[in-house]
Amino acid sequence: MDLSSLHPAPGARSARKRVGRGTGSGLGKTAGRGHKGRKSRSGGNSPPGYEGGQMPLQRRLPKRGFTSPFRKEYEVVNLASLASFPAGSVIDPAALASARLVSRRAKRIKILGDGAIEHALTVKAQAFSQSARAAIEARGGSVEVVA
């Protein structure tokens, strides 16, 4: 056996369809597209969600709820995560991003009171929960709301 004698197993490869080459080919006349209808026409394809004239699913289902265009989404950071910063450090959005506690493109950050801190910190963020604010100030730290 050598490389020149290698070939696919019998039946592994099939000849490509040559459509529209006469009735004897089995794919002549309508070229395997059937008779009439949307898929038989050239350039005819269905848009996403089209169900052949039946009322599409997204139109059959009832509309529910409301999404406010003015919703403010916050990335949250718990106090337990701030415990890793050294005492007296200033924690701002840039410091949180460099510590990978929030994403670099975080627009709004909210500090939540889950966990505990053992030392004073200066924390700057867009929002604070009441428990987080109380816990930071109880340790002698300060809270600053930034825009």
Image (tube, rainbow, N blue to C red):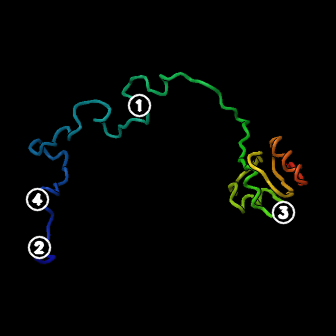
| Residue at the spot of label 3 | 87
Of discs 3 and 1, which sits in the foreground?
A: 3
Amino acid type, callout 1: Tyr
Q: Is residue 45 above or below residue 53?
A: below
Q: Is residue 143 visible?
A: no
Q: CA distance from mark 2 to mark 1?
A: 50 Å
Amino acid type, callout 3: Ala
Q: Is residue 10 above or below residue 62?
A: below
First of labels 1, 4 by sequence position: 4
| Residue at the spot of label 2 | 5
Q: CA distance from mark 2 to mark 3?
A: 75 Å
Q: Residues within 10 Å of mark 3 (few under 14, many from 20)?
A: some
First of labels 3, 1 by sequence position: 1
Asked whether 30 or 91 is in front, the reply is: 91
First of labels 4, 2 by sequence position: 2
Q: Give residue 20's position: percent from left, percent from top.
A: 19, 45
State the SS at label 2: helix
| Residue at the spot of label 4 | 10
Residue 50 lies left or right of residue 61; in this view the side is left
Residue 21 lies left or right of residue 112; in this view the side is left
State the SS at label 4: loop
Q: CA distance from mark 4 to mark 2?
A: 14 Å
Residue found at the far front of this picture: 118
Q: Is residue 22 visible?
A: yes
